[in-house]
Image: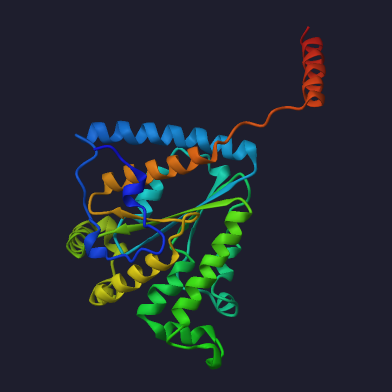
């Protein structure tokens, strides 16, 4: 199977119905050996693109990962980005906001972690939690101390979508390219992965009763994701719905989408000015003289 990024892209303003998006597609790899070869090839290309990004120092890239528990966000980030130079990449995991973060607007805590020019930033969960888990559990919003006069239940989510879209437009205009991944996992596969966490003592810590309780809200989460993806996938900052029942497929698809985005930037190494080239020749002469 050949990977086409557009097959997984959410079209702007098109209503998303997740039950029509697959959680599994035909295997991209024929064997585990073939999978490793394909991923290694993409990782090598990503490493080269990162070097170009760092050297050109003009664009930055932000990767956002959202999903239900056990969808494979952590492992996708770990495997796909394994060839990236840590100096040019940062990963941030956003969980429950701190007391300080709750004293600011809902975009504040992630804004501080946006990537600088020449760098890749990865958000393992993000500001989108504010229109996902907070929508499913609106009581969370009580801790945000927003004036009641500003909390209109009929418009609050639309307003937050607008805030997010405006921020992403601003970032795009200033050179940040945003790629957003929703890892689409089936409830059956989540159950299987939870059972594996129980059976593997080294993974027991990954599962708690609260994770099981959240399964009861599956339909609510899917509705929240559908509305979010429909409202916030744009031409400049698109969402991609990635089938997540097969982790190997997931990683190959994600790596291809990131590569395609990098290629669209047409990055090149900086060209030295005439003055700089002359300076380099002077340095060459000095080094040769010292080495005699």
Q: Establish if 1 lies above or below 60.
A: above
Q: Is residue 183 left or right of residue 139?
A: left
Q: Residue 131: horizontal and vertical position, in percent?
A: 43, 73
Numbered label tally? 0
Q: Residue 73: horizontal and vertical position, in percent?
A: 36, 55
What is the residue that sits farthest to the bottom in this orientation? Answer: 149
Front-most of residues 30 and 171: 171
Check the picture and name the quadrant holding the N terminus.
top left
Colouring method of the image = rainbow
Q: Residue 14: horizontal and vertical position, in percent?
A: 36, 63
Residue shown at the point (43%, 82%) measured from the top left: 140
Front-most of residues 22 and 85: 22
Check the picture and name the quadrant holding the C terminus.
top right
Q: Establish if 25 lies above or below 192.
A: above
Quadrant in which residue 201 is drawn: bottom left
Quadrant in which residue 280 is drawn: top right
Residue shown at the point (43%, 40%) measured from the top left: 260
Residue shown at the point (43%, 61%) measured from the top left: 233
Front-most of residues 103 and 148: 148
What is the residue that sits farthest to the top in this orientation? Answer: 292
What is the residue that sits farthest to the front in this orientation? Answer: 13
Q: Residue 41: horizontal and vertical position, in percent?
A: 37, 31
């Amino acid at each position: 199977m050949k990977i086409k990024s557009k097959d997984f892209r959410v079209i702007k303003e098109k209503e998303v119905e997740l039950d029509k998006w697959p959680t599994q597609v035909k295997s991209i790899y024929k064997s585990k050996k073939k999978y490793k070869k394909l991923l290694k090839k993409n990782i090598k290309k990503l490493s080269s693109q990162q070097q170009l990004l760092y050297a050109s120092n003009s664009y930055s890239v932000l990767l956002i990962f959202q999903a239900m528990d056990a969808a494979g966000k952590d492992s996708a980030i770990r495997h796909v980005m394994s060839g990236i130079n840590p100096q040019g990449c940062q990963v941030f995991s956003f969980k429950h906001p701190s007391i300080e973060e709750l004293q600011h607007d809902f975009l504040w805590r992630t804004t501080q972690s946006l990537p600088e020019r020449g760098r890749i930033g990865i958000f393992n969960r993000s500001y989108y939690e504010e229109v996902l888990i907070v929508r499913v559990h609106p009581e969370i919003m009580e801790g945000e101390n927003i004036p009641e006069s500003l909390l209109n239940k009929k418009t609050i989510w639309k307003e937050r979508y607008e805030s997010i879209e405006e921020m992403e437009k601003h970032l795009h205009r200033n050179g940040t390219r945003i790629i957003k991944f929703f890892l689409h996992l089936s409830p059956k596969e989540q159950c299987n992965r939870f059972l594996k966490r129980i059976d593997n003592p080294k993974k027991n810590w990954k599962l708690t009763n609260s994770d099981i309780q959240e399964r009861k809200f599956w339909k609510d989460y899917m509705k929240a994701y559908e509305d979010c993806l429909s409202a916030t996938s744009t031409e400049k900052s698109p969402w991609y719905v990635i089938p997540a029942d097969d982790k190997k497929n997931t990683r190959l698809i994600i790596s291809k989408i990131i590569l395609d985005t990098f290629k669209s930037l047409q990055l090149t190494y900086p060209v030295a000015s005439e003055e700089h080239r002359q300076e380099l020749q002077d340095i060459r002469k000095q080094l040769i003289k010292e080495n005699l």
